[in-house]
Amino acid sequence: MRGIIILVFLFTPVILFSQEYYVYVAAESDDVVSLIKFDGKVSEEVTRIEVGVMPTEIEGPHGITVGPNGDYWYLSLAHGNPFGSLIKYSTKTNTPIASTKLGLFPASMQVSSTTGLLYCVNFNLHGDMEPSTVSVVDPESMTEITQIMTGSMPHGSRLSSDGLFQYSVAMMSGELFEIDAISLKVNRVLDLENKMDHSMHKDMNHSSMKHSSVKPTWVIPHPYNNVVYVAGNGSDEIIEVDLDKWAVSDRFKTGKGPYNVEITPNGKYLVATLKGEGSTAIWDLDDKSLSNVVKNSTNVSHGVAISSDNKYAFISVEGIGGEPGKVDIIDLNKFKLVSTVNVGKQAGGIAFWKISD
């Protein structure tokens, strides 16, 4: 009898449950957004969502973010006539709920878990080289509350982990902006080339400014330390800014054309796409050492989204010409590419949604 019990125990099947990771990625030249699922080994496109509203125009889905509670995702359509728009979607059905007009070429955005407001930079890619704005939107009513003037061609933007400050970088004027997310005023402005403190932003003469050689394209605050990191796309460097001193505290060289940067939620690794060489670089922020440079599956590496458990980086890769875009998945423990999936052409904006068992 004892032997039978042992045999039953030995041959009882062990059921292993794998986690599934979900990200949204926008394809600017196809007017689609793809929902991607990754089970730790294989990635697949679960659904492809048509997002354009004008039947004969490419409207350019550009920026994308998932709200703090995961119930909604938000998308900017950049190629408006003349202005772009913001659309709110349900993550349950991936259908549009409401929309509103923003500024010229709206790009990156986030919703603050503290204020409940959405902050979206207006990149103004096809407009005059003059100061543009950050649109502030109430995502409940989907109404634009105000526009806050910043620099020339603001592109990358992120909120502080407490949701109280919004940081953005202006690509052509080479500036870092700090906006108070409650008062909706610019607190401070930093020139990333000569380290001038432009606290009196209203007195600046942007029309006389030269185009930046740094060309900052993205900014990410550290989740715990009082610093932010900026991608210097034109100067091939990552710039660390000390928020207490409001000054550049470090610069470290990268490969060609760093574009988007993100930090793992535990603050350990910084991940940057190198748009000019089709690679993704990973730094250990404990000592700012380069952990690895991973070659992407095709050219024109663009966006970064990192899983909430710190394990994977999801990279949008645009492709060239008529090639499909791709999402590359990098294991952040092994520092290697582990999966790739095709999406629409010119994959750009990318946002992590959730992990499910």
Image (spheres, rainbow, N blue to C red):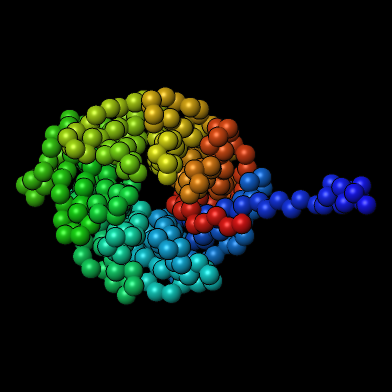
Residue at 34% x, 73% y: name it: 140
Please name the residue shown 17% across and 35% down the image: 245
Residue at 29% x, 72% y: name it: 143
Q: Nearer the viewer, residue 75 or 93?
A: 93
Residue 39 place in picture, x, y as percent: 64, 50
Tell me what residue is drawn at x 49 percent, y 40 percent: 300
Q: Is residue 312 left or right of residue 236?
A: right
Q: Residue furthest front?
A: 1
Q: In this rendering, would 149 be left or right of 293?
A: left
* Closer to us: 124 or 214: 214
Position above or below: 1 against 88: above
Labels in figure, total: 0
User: Where is residue 73 shown, x and y percent of the image?
Assistant: 44, 63
Above or below — where is 257 with respect to 101?
A: above
On screen, residue 17 versus residue 81, left or right, reads right
Question: Is residue 110 at all visible to an observer of this figure?
Answer: yes
Kindly indicate the quadrant of the structure image that contains residue 270.
Answer: top left
Q: Looking at the figure, which quarter contains the C terminus?
A: bottom right
Is 330 displayed left or right of 248 in the figure?
right
Residue 124 is at least partly visible in this image: no
x, y percent for residue 318: 51, 45
Image coordinates for residue 49, horizontal then vertical, percent = 54, 65
- Residue 164, compared with residue 222, is above or below; it is below
